[in-house]
């Protein structure tokens, strides 16, 4: 079982950006939590982050050739704007779970649309870093 965890723009700034919303733990803390959990449940995981939409499209396309079984994505602000990410997921037909650290549904109007939601098996919001673990367990059939 091979899972790819993708994080979009500004998620490398976790711990620094708006701690009242995203918490004080860093991106490295997130990756440690994910890799520890995946080694416990015996899942191979790769984690990637980019601030650039095209890079994220490239990672999704590459996942097809790498025979990735599932993708967890927090697309950051591209959640609300990116038809390109949606089309990439449609192209590769890999199961995807969408994660948001914050309670996006309780935030601004412009955050209420999510293009990735059109293809995501599930959208997990407002659970902090635990949302990524829940998403991995779902894709790995451990929940
Ligand atoms: C986010 C929510 C988005 O609206 C925002 O642009 C982000 C992070 C979250 O994890 O809560 O960058 O995806």
Image (tube, rainbow, N blue to C red):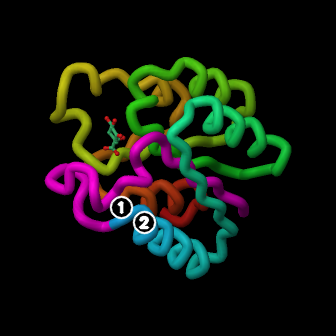
Q: Nearer the viewer, residue 94 or 8?
A: 8
CB of mark 2 within 8 Å of CB of mark 1? yes
Dot placed on the residue nearer the N-terminal end, 2 or 1: 2
Q: 68 above or below 143?
A: above
From the top left corner, tell me how far across and down residue 80 is, in percent: 39, 24
Report how far apart the C-alphas of labels 2 and 1 lie in the structure. Answer: 6 Å
The range drawn in magenta is 1-25
Please indicate whether residue 36 sits to the left or right of residue 15 in the image.
right
**Residue at disc 1, secondary structure:** loop
Q: Which residue is mark 1?
A: 129
**Could you tell me residue 31's position as x and y percent?**
49, 67
Q: Residue at x 61, y 37 (%)?
A: 56
Q: Quadrant of ligand 1?
A: top left
- Examine the image and state in which quarter residue 85 appears: top right
Image x and y of residue 111, in percent: 28, 27
Q: Neighbour class for label 1 at 10 Å: few (<14), some, many (≥20)? A: many
Element marked by disc 2: helix
């Amino acid at each position: 079982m091979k899972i790819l965890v993708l994080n979009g723009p500004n998620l490398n700034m976790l711990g620094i950006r708006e701690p009242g919303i995203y918490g004080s733990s860093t991106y490295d803390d997130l990756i440690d939590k994910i890799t520890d959990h995946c080694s416990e449940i015996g899942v191979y995981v790769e984690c990637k982050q980019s601030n650039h939409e095209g890079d994220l499209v490239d990672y999704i396309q590459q996942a097809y050739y790498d025979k990735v079984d599932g993708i967890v994505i927090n697309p950051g602000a591209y959640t609300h704007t990116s038809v390109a990410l949606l089309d990439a997921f449609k192209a590769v037909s890999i199961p995807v779970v969408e994660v948001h650290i914050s309670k996006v549904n309780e935030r601004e109007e412009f955050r209420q649309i999510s293009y990735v939601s059109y293809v995501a098996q599930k959208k997990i919001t407002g659970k902090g870093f635990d949302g990524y673990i829940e998403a991995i367990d779902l894709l790995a059939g451990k929940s």
